[in-house]
Image: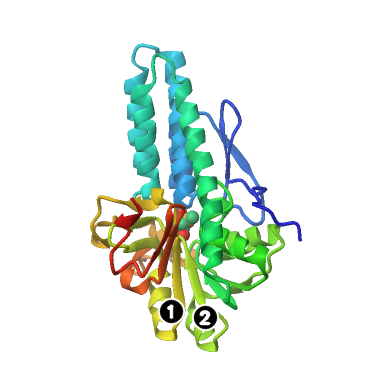
Amino acid sequence: MALTNNLSVQALQWTGGALKVLDQRHLPAQVLYDEYLDAAGVAEAITSMRVRGAPAIGIAAAYGVVLSALKHFADNASTWRELVAADMAVLAASRPTAVNLFTALAQMQAALAAADSDPASLLACAQKIHADDIAANCRMGELGAALLADAKGILTHCNTGALATGGYGTALGVIRSRYQRQPIAVYAGETRPWLQGARLTVWELSQDGIPATLIADSAAAWLMKSGAIDWLIVGADRIAANGDTANKIGTYSLAVLAKHHGVNVMVVAPTTTIDWDLADGSGIAIEQRAPQELLPDCYQDNALVSAWNPVFDVTPAELISVIVTERGIVLNPSQHGVRGLL
Ligand code: MRU
């Protein structure tokens, strides 16, 4: 088993003058990369979910700012800052829930303000955001795996791996690290309606030689009842100061089920996913995606059949056993929230 901090699957690659984005809509059938040369293209890649996952969205947006600066500086050196600011607003509107997008744009905004009359330092900032995310994931992998010494089985939800991050992954990084120490049974929920679990997670794990068992989302309660798993391990799109956590739709239901069945719940996220100014999860904007993503073909034009398609939900802190970040872990976050990490 040749497992290291495997970065072979890369959602994003900077080529020197363009951003290559692995189009995740086609996985696992096809591995296709698109090349982007401007911020509007990157924003569209985020909105259309060619690239998805909270940290990866933030990193893509950072490179989008670099592309914007390179383009506008070459075209119009006197007004390039204003033009870049306009592109940053477009990037900020690409998806609402993952706070990593706004964290990354704030970092790029600071770099833009400090940049002299040359945008080169913006690339350094984007590459640092990317490298820091990989480093955070590897650290969280170690911290999370250390909590799983006696675990026999893990259920995960959505895709939180290299595809969703700069590399290695958050929840999937913990699973990778645990598996490197000692193989463990890994179950992945399909994650309807976009099927991040079925299309991305089991594929990504198989690239690393890690066996995974796919379950229908609706099989989770019965799996927990069977006693096969002792941990639910998920990522996050936004964590409020009190520990309430927004993540892929279905996470809340799984956490409720976990409480009933005595299964531990681990949230794994870098501190770029924490919204320090948000007191609790009630203020988190939940993205609603088009009904067409949920409706079967036969109902696409049926006036009587509609769809409600929120793609995230908020799990209250009291249902979470531990939050793992690169700065340390927070046990029972409902007691004191996550501000102690600051
Ligand atoms: O809609 P998506 O696929 O972008 O949602 C992704 C998730 O909900 C992930 O669990 C979350 O971003 C953490 S990824 C490390």
Q: Earlier in the sequence, mark 2 or mark 1?
A: 2
**243 with respect to 128 (left or right):** left
Q: Is residue 313 above or below residue 46?
A: below
Tell me: residue 218, above or below residue 5: below
Relative to 255, is 9 on the left or the right? right
Which numbered marker is on residue 243?
none
Q: Quadrant of the N terminus?
A: bottom right
In the picture, the disc for residue 219 is: 2
Q: Residues within 10 Å of mark 2 (few under 14, many from 20)?
A: few
Mark 1 residue element:
helix
Mark 1 burial class by Cα count in 10 Å: few <14, some 14-19, many 20+: many
Horizontal and vertical percent position of residue 275:
31, 51
| 308 with respect to 23 (left or right) | left
Quarter of the rendering containing residue 77: top left
Q: CA distance from mark 2 to mark 1?
A: 13 Å
Q: Which amino acid, by three-letter code, is at mark 1?
A: Ala
Residue under label 1: 258
Q: Position of residue 287 (x, y in %)?
A: 34, 56
Can residue 281 be spotted in the picture?
Answer: yes
Q: Nearer the viewer, residue 158 or 23?
A: 158
Task: Tell me which corner region of the image, top left, top right, bottom left or bottom right, holds residue 288.
Answer: bottom left
Amino acid, disc 2: Ala
- Does the beta carbon at disc 2 come under 8 Å from ligand 1? no
* Residue depicted at 35% across the width and 54% down the height: 341
